[in-house]
Image (cartoon, helix red, strand yellow):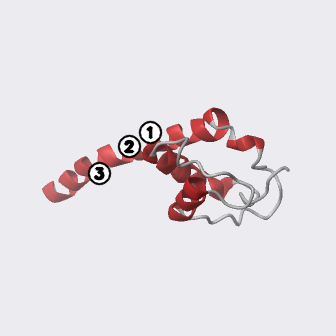
């Protein structure tokens, strides 16, 4: 039982850190870099968006198609944060993030 409590206690900072990173990522997505302006979040695909964090990190860092690279605009922590936000919250969106307005 003591080991269980210790494990829970040790994992709490990482849970709080993850929640903080999601909030930072959300702010980047909706405000700081306004990703929302291009990435439509209401097209219908049945919520089948399953982008992994690493896949999103690669796209945000290096760009993809008409999306520019953000490696010179965002810190590694910010890229990780927005990637965690997108890969976590994207499961609730009804479109693929590759949808964009041109």
Q: Is residue 87 above or below residue 75?
A: below
Judging by the rendered image, the residue that carries numbered circle 1 is: 20
Judged from the image, the secondary structure of the residue bearing numbered disc 1 is: helix
Q: Is 7 on the left-hand or right-hand side of 91?
A: left
Few, some or many residues within 10 Å of mark 2 (<14, 14–19, 20+): few
Nearer the observer: mark 3 or 1; the answer is 1
How many residues crowd around disc 1 within 10 Å: few (fewer than 14), some, or many (20 or more)?
Answer: few
The answer to whether residue 84 is left or right of residue 102 is left
On residue 17, which mark appears? 2
Residue 84: give its label.
Answer: none
Circle 3: is it few (<14), some (14-19), or many (20+) Cα within 10 Å? few
Image quadrant where residue 92 sits: bottom right
| Dot 2 or dot 3, earlier in sequence | 3
Residue 33 drawn at (x, y percent) = 64, 38
Instruction: Kindly report the distance in space between the C-alpha atoms of the residues bearing marks 2 and 1.
Output: 5 Å
N-terminal-most mark, 3 or 1:
3
Q: Position of residue 4 (x, y in %)?
A: 21, 58
Task: From the top left corner, tell me how far across and down residue 70 is, in percent.
Answer: 58, 48
The residue closer to the viewer here, 87 or 57, is: 57
Mark 3 to mark 1: distance in Å? 14 Å
Give the residue displayed 44% in from the left and 39% down from the top: 20
The answer to the question of whether label 2 and label 1 lie on touching residues, with beta carbons closer than 8 A, is yes
Q: Which residue is mark 3?
A: 11
Question: In x, y percent, where is residue 78?
Answer: 49, 43
Between residues 65 and 17, which one lies in front from this camera angle? 65
Q: Compared to 26, does 59 lie above or below?
A: below
Q: Are marks 3 and 1 in contact (CB under 8 Å)?
A: no
Which quadrant, please, contains the N terminus? bottom left
């Amino acid at each position: 039982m003591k080991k269980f409590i210790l494990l829970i206690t040790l994992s709490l900072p990482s849970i709080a850190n993850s929640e903080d990173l999601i909030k930072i990522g959300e702010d980047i997505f909706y405000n700081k870099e306004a990703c929302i302006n291009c990435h439509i979040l209401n097209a219908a695909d049945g919520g089948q968006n399953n982008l992994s964090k690493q896949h999103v990190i690669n796209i945000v860092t290096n760009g993809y198609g008409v999306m520019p690279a953000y490696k010179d605009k965002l810190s590694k922590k910010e890229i990780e944060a927005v990637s965690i936000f997108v890969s976590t919250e994207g499961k609730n969106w009804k479109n693929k993030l590759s949808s964009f307005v041109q």
